[in-house]
Amino acid sequence: MRTPFLTLIAIAALQSAAPAEAQTFDPRYPVCMHVYTSGGFGGDYYDCSFASIPQCRASASGRAANCDVNPYHAFNAPPPARHSRYNRVD
């Protein structure tokens, strides 16, 4: 009697777990807004479409949200090298 009951509990626990989702940050923008939803179970999300903290705070005003620096934005990255077939140095 104990084995079917434990099996039923294990199946119920696996079915009630929320699926994991990968969070993607847009590296083109330096500021992200973390929006908190009331649903729980991973309903929160990040909106990485802001150029500055004040711009993000204006959008977050009156919402359950917080502005954070994007950890994947390359702040001081050098510009990409320009390659041209006409500017060859021998």
Image: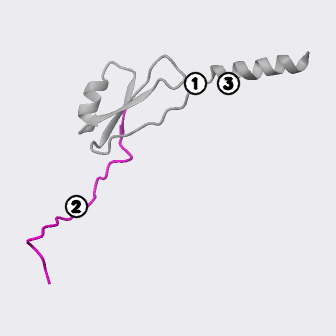
Residue 77 falls inside the magenta stretch? yes
Q: Secondary structure at mark 3?
A: helix
**Residue behind mark 1:** 18
* Boundaries of the magenta span: 67-90
Task: Name the residue rendered at 25%, 26% in the picture.
Answer: 58
Residue 33 in the image, given as x and y percentages of width and height: 35, 32
Amino acid type assigned to the residue bearing label 2 in the image: Pro
In this rendering, the answer to whether 42 lies above or below 1 is below
The label number, if any, that marks residue 14 in the structure image: 3
Considering depth in this image, is 65 or 8 the residue closer to the camera? Answer: 8
Residue 88 in the image, given as x and y percentages of width and height: 12, 76
Residue closest to the far front:
85
Amino acid type assigned to the residue bearing label 1 in the image: Ala
Horizontal side of 23 relative to 1 (left or right) equals left
Which of marks 3 and 2 precedes in the sequence? Answer: 3
Residue 59 in the image, given as x and y percentages of width and height: 27, 25
- Quarter that holds the N terminus: top right
- Quarter that holds the C terminus: bottom left
Task: Name the residue rendered at 90%, 18% in the picture.
Answer: 2
In this rendering, the answer to whether 86 lies above or below 77 is below
Horizontal side of 60 relative to 83 (left or right) equals right
Q: Secondary structure at mark 1?
A: loop
Residue 36 falls inside the magenta stretch? no
The label number, if any, that marks residue 80 in the structure image: 2
Say whether marks 2 and 1 touch (CB < 8 Å). no
